[in-house]
Image (spheres, rainbow, N blue to C red):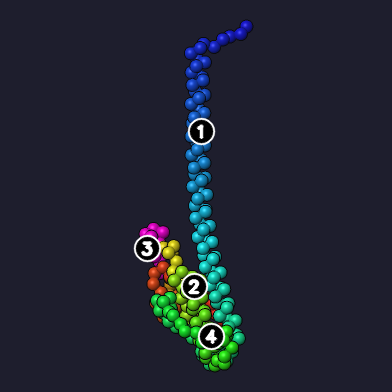
Amino acid sequence: MKIKSHPAIASRGRRRQGGATLIEALVSILIMSIGLLGIAGLQLNAMTFQKNAWSTHRVAEVTNDLAERIRANPAGATNGDYSYTADYATGAAATFTSNNCRTSGSFCSTAQIAADDITDFVLKAQASLPQGAAQITGTPAAGFVITTMYMDKEFVNPATGALLTTPTCTATTTGIEWRNCCPAAANAPAGVRCRRFNIIP
């Protein structure tokens, strides 16, 4: 014997089923929204890492070019001609007059060749990096310390949005901190990052 359900009971069942479907859809949308927010956060982090990798690559290119020039002029290195200690503001705004030693074919002293190498190095730092500047210190025996500096507008405190200041190098600074600190003589303002390499000709 077939028992038929009352129409009112069947209608309430359909309404309950319809309501459950709507809730499931809303929960699905909520979960999808959370996932999309997570993906957006990952993308922002990836862009930051990509920018840092790009700037590090540019610094390495500029530094490697100077290292090859120093090795090609050992007399200039020995005589202490590879020294440039302008602070950040001065270096970022500096202009130079080249002797054209490597392009003109004319005779140049080792000091003039070194001056041209420093000119090319600083100008490349200015052109390759945002508000770029550079310093060269040290000796052939202990190694030349090549410091490249640039402005990073995203180097900020996440809580306040204020530009951060790179730690100043000290006599006890070592390791990764030494590679990323700024020399005291650079007087680097907030927002400036420093990358340092030691080169022994």
How packed is label 2: few (under 14 Cα within 10 Å), some, or many (20 or more)?
few
User: Do the residues bearing badges 4 and 3 touch, measured as CB atoms within 8 Å?
Assistant: no
Say which element carries label 4.
loop
**In front of the other: label 4 or label 1?**
4
- State yes or no: discs 1 and 3 in contact (Cβ < 8 Å): no
Three-letter amino acid code at the position of disc 2: Ala
Task: Report, in whole angstroms, how far the alpha carbon at label 3 lies from the one at label 2.
Answer: 26 Å
User: Which marked residue is nearer to the observer: mark 4 or mark 3?
Assistant: 4
Position of residue 81 measured from the top left corner of the image (x, y, whole percent): 51, 89
**Residue at screen point 48% across, 18% down:** 12
Q: Is residue 4 above or below residue 33?
A: above
Nearest to viewer (mark 2 / mark 1) = 2
How far is mark 4 from mark 3, CA to CA? 43 Å
The residue closer to the viewer here, 190 or 19, is: 190
Pick the quarter of the image with the N terminus: top right
Mark number, residue 162: 3
Residue 154 location, x and y as percent? 44, 62
Q: Secondary structure at mark 1?
A: helix
Q: Which residue carries the number 4 mark?
A: 100
- The stretch of residues the image draws in magenta is 157-165
Q: Looking at the image, which residue is at 51% across and 20% down?
A: 14
Going from N to C along the chain, the mark reached first, 4 or 1, is: 1
Pointer 2: what residue?
127
Q: Earlier in the sequence, mark 2 or mark 1?
A: 1
Q: Is there CB contact under 8 Å for labels 4 and 1?
A: no
Pointer 1 residue: 25
Q: Amino acid at mark 4?
A: Asn
Marks 4 and 2 sit apart, C-alpha to C-alpha, by 19 Å
Percent across and percent down for residue 47 are 51, 58
As measured in the structure, the alpha-carbon distance from the residue carrying label 4 to the one carrying label 1 is 71 Å
Between the residue at mark 2 and the residue at mark 1, the CA separation in whole angstroms equals 54 Å
> Upstream in the sequence, badge 4 or badge 3?
4
